[in-house]
Amino acid sequence: MDRPQSKVPASPAGRQGPRSEVTDQTATTKKLVIEAKGLTKTYGDGKTRTSVLKGVDLEMAEGEFLTILGPSGSGKSTLMHILGAMDLPSSGQVHLFGQDLKNLSETERSHLRNKKIGFVFQFDSLLPEFTVEENVLMPARIAGEDRKPRALELLRFFGLSRVQHKFPPELSGGEKQRAALVRALLNHPELLLADEPTGNLDKHNTELVLHDLWELSQSKKVAIVLVTHNEQASRFSSRTLHMTDGKLTEAG
Ligand SMILES: Nc1ncnc2c1ncn2[C@@H]1O[C@H](COP(=O)(O)OP(=O)(O)OP(=O)(O)O)[C@@H](O)[C@H]1O
Ligand SMILES: [Mg+2]
């Protein structure tokens, strides 16, 4: 990260508009990060059978920033878990970084997740008995990597230096969400899946985080899928899709 948070303007209005700079990033010259075709997901059976995803198609290239909007219960988190190789679809195909998830073992899927994907869960996922710094460094520790300098840099970037030795229950909702983002970004993921990462943030901090994500997609070519109820997010992303009736459709 090369820009301290204090220099980020409060509103995107005064800077070069994120949207206007984003060209068609689905151009074929770009490396495809996600290729999903005909995804379905059904939970339960018999009377409890619920069809959540009913044929989702999605292609995403590196550096693309996609926002997904949609009502509660429409299947956004379900889709994110499949795109994050944490769950398999009931039918359909998912290729991540050119690899068909069906052909990967559980261990290989977990390796892919650790190496290339950062995930921010919708609900609090920090471990309460560890400090913010320890939480953020946990995946790197497990992988046997020393990421402390990057962790400290990211904590500073997201305005969390002050709370780095605190425990999650001592943090505000927004601080917890930013800490979860730091943890997801620690290993330079090529794909960031963020499920409502701004749900607990005020307008100002929401814009800061969205701008930071936009910058990440531009400068580091990180592909970002952002699930949100905040329609403002579309201003920062290169594409917006709606989850409706178990399918992703173009906005508007
Ligand atoms: N493990 C599960 N078992 C059974 N049903 C499930 C499971 N996970 C999700 N569902 C159901 O699937 C539907 C979609 O859930 P999902 O969490 O994907 O929605 P969402 O769009 O993320 O909603 P929200 O905006 O409230 O987070 C819901 O009706 C939910 O009850
Ligand atoms: Mg959800």
Image (tube, helix red, strand yellow):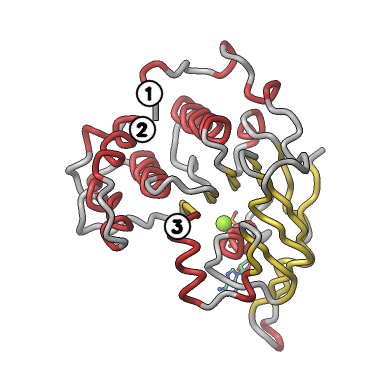
Tell me the residue that label 2 is attached to: 158
Residue in the foreground of this view, choosing between 239 and 115: 115
Residue extending farthest left: 165
Q: Which numbered disc, 3 or 1, marks the residue closer to the eye?
A: 3
Q: Position of residue 236 (x, y in %)?
A: 62, 30
How crowded pointer 1 is (Cα within 10 Å; few <14, some 14-19, many 20+) is rated as some
How crowded pointer 2 is (Cα within 10 Å; few <14, some 14-19, many 20+) is rated as many
Tell me, for residue 115, which label it has, or none.
Answer: 3
Residue shown at 46% from the left, 51% from the top:
120
- Quarter of the image with the C terminus is top right
Q: Picture quarter containing residue 171?
A: top left
Q: Position of residue 186 (x, y in %)?
A: 37, 46
Marks 2 and 3, how far apart in space?
A: 22 Å
Tell me, for residue 5, which label it has, or none.
Answer: 1
- Mark 1 element type: helix
Q: Amino acid at mark 2?
A: Phe
Q: Position of residue 79 (x, y in %)?
A: 63, 61
Ligand 2, seen in the image, is in the quarter at: bottom right
Q: Is mark 1 within 8 Å of ligand 2?
A: no
CB under 8 Å between discs 2 and 1? yes
Q: Position of residue 57 (x, y in %)?
A: 77, 58
Residue shown at 70% from the left, 42% from the top:
30
